[in-house]
Image (tube, rainbow, N blue to C red):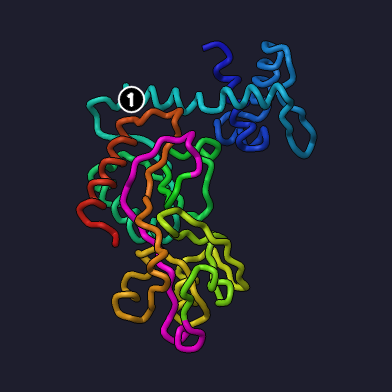
Amino acid sequence: MKNWEAMEAFIEVVRQGSFSAAAIQLKVSASHISRLITQLESELGTTLLFRTTRRIRLSEAGELYYQHCRGLPEALSSAEEVISTLNQAPIGPFKMTCATTFGERFIAPLMNDFLIDHPKIELDFHLTNREVDLIEEGYDLAIRMGALKDSSHLSRRLCDRAEYLCASRSYVDQHGIPHTLAELSKHQCLIGSKTHWLFQQDGQRKEVKIVSNWRSNSGPALLDAVRKGLGIAQLPDYYVADDLASGHLIALLPQYQYPYSGVWLVYPKVRQPSPKLQKICDYLIHRLKQNPPF
């Protein structure tokens, strides 16, 4: 395993953005990190990092080296875990992420139930509507909604999801309803984290760019604005199912509604599913199949 410690130090410096932060993460001194990288550069015969008093910057060789090496620590950890946890209960750290509201409402309770039976799991559950970089930020698992953009990861379908275009009765009474996608431009549209709404037209997927003077990255804030008649929004079923059933909100343009899209379990391809990851994925799929969230 020649240069393994130095390579691990180099990867962590790039990820953390500084020698001191990498040293804290690896629980060694910053001077030790510096010596390791100097040794690595000497072995490779090239400069990997340009150092200044304020920041570090990758050289061209450093960028290439990092791209080839960045997944190796996780791959080694996964390989060791496969062996160490074979025929054993899941154990050790597990870092996962999910969209805030979906995670709070559905995933967190399931993971808490899972931990009751598997108390040796050290769970780090990060809720954010930002799409994190699984490898760069060290996540074992992400739960993502809708169409997947990054084909470099592995995925499993967790459950279905649909999005509804909707408005309050007060908004409809005052402004009427759109009858075509083109008419949306004449209405007050409210947007969340996405600037395009997804529809189906003539059997084809169609995305419509929305211009709005109201925007929030909070789903509950968006739902509140719709309920109060401020405009039209496209929201997932788990936000609006009760309001639609009660008649407090009205579904618009049902003829253009996109069929069910997926909620996905996504994990890095460099990390083959370990027994721990496999068990958690199987558990979440099983529980949501038993009790669909919507």
Identify which residue is drawn at 23% across, 51% down: 289
Q: Residue furthest right?
A: 52
Q: Estimate the x, y position of residue 278 in percent, counting from the top left.
A: 30, 35
How many numbered badges does the structure rendering display? 1
Query: Is 264 on the left-hand or right-hand side of 129?
Result: left
Amino acid of disc 1: Val
User: Is residue 154 highlighted in magenta?
Assistant: yes
Which quadrant of the view contains residue 270?
A: top left
Identify which residue is drawn at 59% across, 21% down: 7
- Disc 1: which residue: 82
Q: Estimate the x, y position of residue 53 in percent, counting from the top left.
A: 79, 36
Q: Estimate the x, y position of residue 274 in percent, counting from the top left.
A: 34, 30
Q: Secondary structure at mark 1?
A: helix
Residue range (magenta): 149-176
Query: Is 223 on the left-hand or right-hand side of 186?
Result: left
Question: Which of 136/251 is in front?
Answer: 251
Which quadrant of the view contains residue 68?
A: top right
